Amino acid sequence: MKKAIIAGSNGQDGRLLTDLLLKKGYDLLGIHKKGLSGAKPSSIESIDISDPAQVERIAKVFQPAEIYYLAAFHHSSQDKVPDNVELFEKSFQVNTFGFVYFLEAVRSVCPGARLMYAASSKIFGEPETDIQTELTPMNPVCVYGMSKAAGVSACRHYRLVHKIFASAAILYNHESSLRDEKFLSRKIIKSAIAIKSGRQSNLELGDLDAEVDWGYAPDYVEAMFRIVQMQNPEDLIVATGEKHSVREFAEAVFRALGMDWKQYVKEIKGVVSRSPRALVGDPSRLKLLTGWRPSIDFAGMIYRLLEEEGVLAHGK
């Protein structure tokens, strides 16, 4: 039975990955803010990923075959703006240094373990190309992107210098019903459902022309797993390669619920700040090396998200 550690097991991706690996028969140990969770009891009651000694100890005791680093600190544009120094400290502590501690633990106490880092399309910032590949230069413009870019660089350093199996999955936007409601996709869906039931009158959104490369989260978690199973470690883009506007997303959701979105959606410029260029990833190399393919398209994803909310009949 393979053993795996999931750092950040209580987030959307962590919960989906937990389900996936348990179905594959893994012995799992999940790490999240409130301590440890897992399929087996552990003598270690809690772990602070900002403490390298604790990270090394859990790796030494559990001896995982695979480690998935999904832990992340992400400041949303809707959150209260923190102090600049505090934002940098928290972002780099969780998104970079926590990962480095796991890299170092693998190097020192479980060198055979395979490690995957959940990176972000934000590492590209405002790229010069319409579509990004693994060769697109990292050019982050936000603190989250900067800390994630540093994590990717750490991954590459340990892979090159210490010969560790460490790969980064460069993840573009991916949605499920487990998404936090502060994210745009969930805001649109929850509001549309509330409007349908008469509990809400309208929905205010920012730039309706803003475009996003949207994918289905369970598909992206499957991609993470496949990246770890590869013969050789490599950083790969996980995306659909297509972009859709906020307008398209809202229209599809309201249409599926039998409503005309134009009657309820109000565009409020500046509500959410977005990059002037849409980030669209090219997943060609991932497909070539792992055989991965998205299980559903954009329209199918919208319908699946509504199914998961219990407002549409499954398989309709």
Image (cartoon, rainbow, N blue to C red):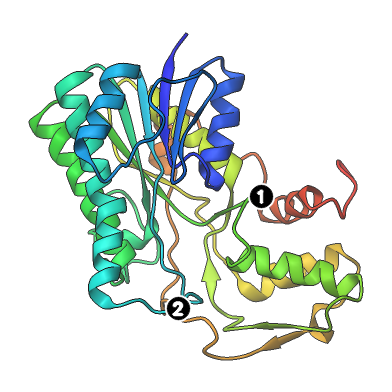
In this figure, which residue is indicated by the disc labeled 2? 80
Residue 54 is situated, as x and y percent measured from the top left of the image, at: 26, 33
Q: Few, some or many C-alpha atoms within 10 Å of disc 2 (few <14, some 14-19, many ≥20)?
A: few
In this figure, which residue is indicated by the disc labeled 1? 297
Which residue, as the protein is rendered here, is positioned at the far left? Answer: 161
Q: How far apart are marks 2 and 1 (CA)?
A: 34 Å
Residue 65 is situated, as x and y percent measured from the top left of the image, at: 35, 18
Horizontal side of residue 229 vs 291, given as left or right: left
**Res 168 → quadrant:** top left
Residue pictured at 49% horizontal, 39% vertical:
9
Q: How many marks?
A: 2
Looking at the image, tell me whether mark 2 or mark 1 is earlier in sequence order. Answer: 2
| SS of the residue under disc 1 | loop
Residue pictured at 32% horizontal, 68% vertical:
125
Horizontal side of residue 242 vs 86, given as left or right: right
Q: Few, some or many C-alpha atoms within 10 Å of disc 1 (few <14, some 14-19, many ≥20)?
A: few
Residue 72 visible in rendering: yes
| SS of the residue under disc 2 | loop
